[in-house]
Image (cartoon, rainbow, N blue to C red):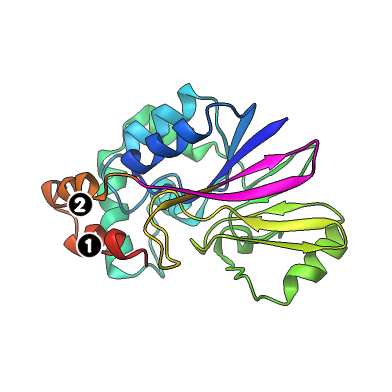
Amino acid sequence: MKIGLISDIHGNLVALEEVLKSLNDCDEIYCAGDVVGYYPFPNEVVEILRDNDVKCVMGNHDYAVVTGDFFGFNEYARIAGEWTRKNLKEENLDWLSELPLKLETEWFLICHGMPAEDLRIIEEYIFPDDPRIEYILEDLEENVVVGHTHIQFVKWHRGLFFANPGSVGQPRDGNPDSAFAIYDTEKNEIKLKRVKYNIQEVYDAVVKAGLPEFLGDRLFHGY
């Protein structure tokens, strides 16, 4: 069985469509949160995830858009979040509000930030060199998939993996190509993948929507 792993789409429909083409032979697709925020296609992204039965958890941007609480967000994230909340259809906002904070599957636990029983589950950053990774895997005794950092990595420890598929909509590891991963359950093998997409189209949509130009410009640089 092949499982597609995605995260941090952030309303970037153009990138999502290219990634889904690369995942068309997967049996299931899971998203580690931040469906919306930053880019101006929140309704289209929510609807394509629903149409493709992508199983999602809630991210910090999703939570902020649902609650209207953007405390702690930088100026760009706040502006984009408020724009998203204003422009999101009611039925799509309802869908977003019903996302769980975590999902337990036969193969892994998936959440946005880090496994926790409080809001750290959507707020805590786990970077590739974080020494807590080994302790988390030993404590949970199961594979873990997260998002949030927009940095793609997989770490193995005693036969278990801790993985971040990277960001579909706004990579921050110096590579502008959209990031995702594929997990083969039979081989217990996870492969990190990248795919190019039309960044200029997203940039133009950002400008047209009146969102900060910086949000479009950063996509060309992958940060």
Q: Helix, strand or loop at disc 1? A: helix
- Say whether marks 2 and 1 touch (CB < 8 Å): yes
Highlighted range, magenta: 181-196
Disc on the earlier residue, 2 or 1: 2
Across and down, in percent, residue 135 comes to 81, 70
189 part of magenta stretch: yes
Q: Residue at x 15, y 48 (%)?
A: 204
Image coordinates for residue 53, horizontal then vertical, percent: 55, 25
| Residue at the spot of label 1 | 217
On residue 203, which mark appears?
A: 2
As drawn, 177 above or below 6: below
For residue 144, above or below residue 6: below
Q: Amino acid at mark 1?
A: Asp
Q: Residues within 10 Å of mark 1 (few under 14, many from 20)?
A: some
Quick check: 135 above or below 207? below
Residue at image point 20% right, 52% down:
203
